[in-house]
Amino acid sequence: DESHAEGLSPSVVSYNTALGACGYDSANWARALRLTAEMGERRVEPSVVTHSALIRSCDASGQWRAALRLLLELRRSGLELDAKACNIGVGVYRSGGQWEGALDFIEEMRWREYQPEVVAHNTAISVCAAGLVWQAALLMLSTARRAGSRLDVIGYNTAISSASQGGPWEQAVLQMEGLRLCGL
């Protein structure tokens, strides 16, 4: 590596930038793993951003089990999770079809006083609906409303669809009324 030969050493920011470039390209997850290994070889301490980028890269490439393993390592690492890491975590659990984990991450975000993004709520509702757990989808919607979180039509529609397919029709109608009251 030319920069190393000149006495320059990449920093955690340099690595995070490179890992970020790997993030959404499914062909780059192995490259992201190599970059992270290289950080260890060069004694560059990874940050929560490093871990998040690596997890996102694995998840985007369909390697959700590897992403989940890395996510659990991040939680045990002692690093302070940020809102972005938590949102990525919700997505990993969605990829694995594990609705309980997605809901746990939403709850952890609230515990840390992070405001879950609309996408995080929609993802959690979606994984509950896909798991045929309409009660959990409706609970997620209700909890988000009570917490004052922003919701959108996608989350409501997913919860309504889930309730109409697996639950009593009255629940679907009730959620439609909630959608109307929110002005969506």
Image: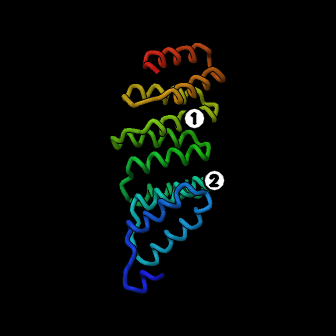
For residue 126, the mark is 1
Task: Establish if 4 lies above or below 88.
Answer: below
Percent across and percent down for residue 73 are 48, 59
Taking depth in this image into account, of 137 and 39 the one nearest to the observer is: 39
Q: Mark 2 falls on what kind of element?
A: loop
* Disc 1: CA contacts within 10 A as few (<14), some (14-19) or many (>=20): many
Task: Establish if 182 lies above or below 89.
Answer: above
Residue at the image point whose x is 56% and y is 39% from the top: 99
Residue at the image point whose x is 54% and y is 71% from the top: 34
Taking depth in this image into account, of 111 and 161 the one nearest to the observer is: 161
Residue type at numbered disc 1 = Ser
Task: Establish if 3 lies above or below 68.
Answer: below
Percent across and percent down for residue 76 are 44, 58
- Cα–Cα gap, marks 2 and 1: 18 Å
Percent across and percent down for residue 10 are 40, 74
Count of numbered marks: 2
| In the image: residue 19, left or right of residue 161 | left
The residue beneath circle 2 is 62
Q: Mark 1 falls on what kind of element?
A: helix
